[in-house]
Amino acid sequence: MSDSFHLENKVALVTGGASGIGAATARELTRAGAEVIIADINQAAAESFAKEVPGSRAAAMDVTDAASIARVFEGVSKLDILVNNAGIGLVGDISRTSEEDFERVMRVNVTSVFLVTRAALPLLLASHGSIVNIGSVAGSVGVKQRFAYCASKGAVQAITRQIAVDYPKELRVNCIAPGTVETPFVEGYLEKYHAHEKEKVRAELVARQPIGRLGTPEDVASLVRFLCSKEAEFINGAVVPIDGGWTAA
Ligand SMILES: NC(=O)c1ccc[n+]([C@@H]2O[C@H](COP(=O)([O-])OP(=O)(O)OC[C@H]3O[C@@H](n4cnc5c(N)ncnc54)[C@H](O)[C@@H]3O)[C@@H](O)[C@H]2O)c1
C-alpha cells in the first residue's frame, strides 16, 4: 500500500474508532498520512488507543446524541473523510425482537449515520470529502435471527445511495458490506449466546464464508483507505461487499 492510496493532509473522523473495524481503520488512515479523530462513546478506550496511534486524537461522542456530536464538531475546522462505523448487533427473529430493542438498534446503526453525516456535511462539502458507511452483508441478504440488524444495515445502504444522488459532484459516499469479521463484536456475541459451544458456532460462521476464514479488521480498513483515496474517485454511491464470497454464493 505504501506507493498508493495516500491521504496526506486529510483529516478523518472514525465513529466507533476505539475497537475492532473502527480501530483498524483509524490506524490504517494514519498510516496513509491522514490525521484521525477517534470518536467513540467509550472515552477511556478511545483515549488509550489514540495514545498508541501517532497522528490520531480521541473525542468522546455518542453517535445517537445530536448534542454530543455537535460538541465534537465545535472543535473540528476541516474534515475530508467521515467513516460512519459505530454500530451494535442484536440476535432474534421478528417474534423475539422487542420494540425497545428494535428502536435501539435503529438509533445506533441508522439514526447515527443521519446525525453524524448531517453535522459533518458543511465541512465535507467544503473539502469535496468522502464518506464511508460501514454496513454489512446483512443489508444485502437475509441473515437468520438478525431481524433488527438486517433492517438497520439495509437502511445504511439506502442512505448511502440517497446521499450520492443528492451530492453527486460535491462529495463521494460509499458503503462497505463486510461478512463476519473477527472483532470484540463477534466475540461478545459468541460469549453471550453460545458460551458453551463457542468453537462450534465459530466454525459455522467460518463455513458461510466460502474463502474459509473470518475477515480481519485490517481487511476492511484497507478497503476504507482505498475508497477514500484519489484512486477511487470514480466510485460513488456503491455498496462494496467484503465477505470472502458469502454473498456471491
Ligand atoms: N464484526 C463483524 O462481523 C461485522 C460485520 C459486518 C459489519 N460490522 C459492522 O462494523 C461496525 C463495527 O463493528 P465491530 O465489529 O468493529 O464492533 P466493536 O464492537 O468491536 O466496535 C464498535 C465500537 O463502536 C462504539 N460504539 C457503540 N455504540 C456507540 C455510540 N452510541 N456512539 C459512539 N460509539 C459507539 C463502541 O464503543 C466500540 O468501540 C458496526 O457498524 C458493525 O455493525 C461488523
Image (cartoon, rainbow, N blue to C red):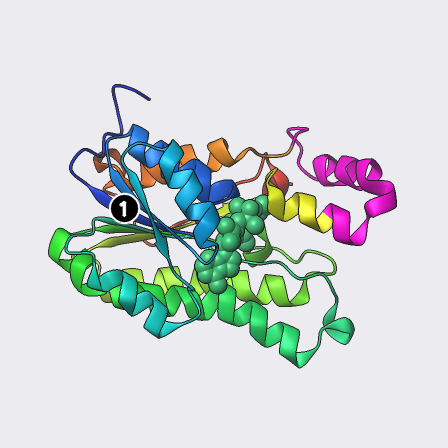
Locate residue 105, reporting x and y percent.
57, 68
What residue is rendered at 87% in x and 44% in y? 196
What residue is rendered at 49% in x and 32% in y? 219
Going by the picture, which residue comes out furthest to the right? 196
Q: Magenta segment range?
A: 190-213
Circle 1 residue: 12
What residue type is disc 1 on?
Ala
- Quarter of the image where the C terminus is located: top right
In the image, taking residue 166 as reference, residue 147 lies left or right, namely right
Above or below: residue 97 compared with residue 135: below
Q: Is mark 1 within 8 Å of ligand 1?
A: no
Q: Quadrant of residue 245?
A: top right
Locate residue 229, reporting x and y percent.
25, 37
Locate residue 160, reporting x and y percent.
37, 60
Closest to the observer, 208 or 5? 5
What residue is rendered at 81% in x and 35% in y? 199
In the image, taking residue 140 as reference, residue 194 lies left or right, namely right
Q: Main secondary structure of the magenta part?
A: helix
Q: Quadrant of residue 230?
A: top left
- Quarter of the image where the N terminus is located: top left
SS for callout 1: strand
Going by the picture, which residue comes out furthest to the left? 126
Going by the picture, which residue comes out furthest to the bottom? 99
In the image, taking residue 185 as reference, residue 190 lies left or right, namely right
Locate residue 171, reporting x and y percent.
21, 55
Q: Residues within 10 Å of mark 1 (few under 14, many from 20)?
A: many
Does 71 lie within the magenta span?
no
In the image, taking residue 81 as reference, residue 137 lies left or right, namely right
Q: Quadrant of residue 233?
A: top left
- Whether residue 240 appears in this view of the structure is no
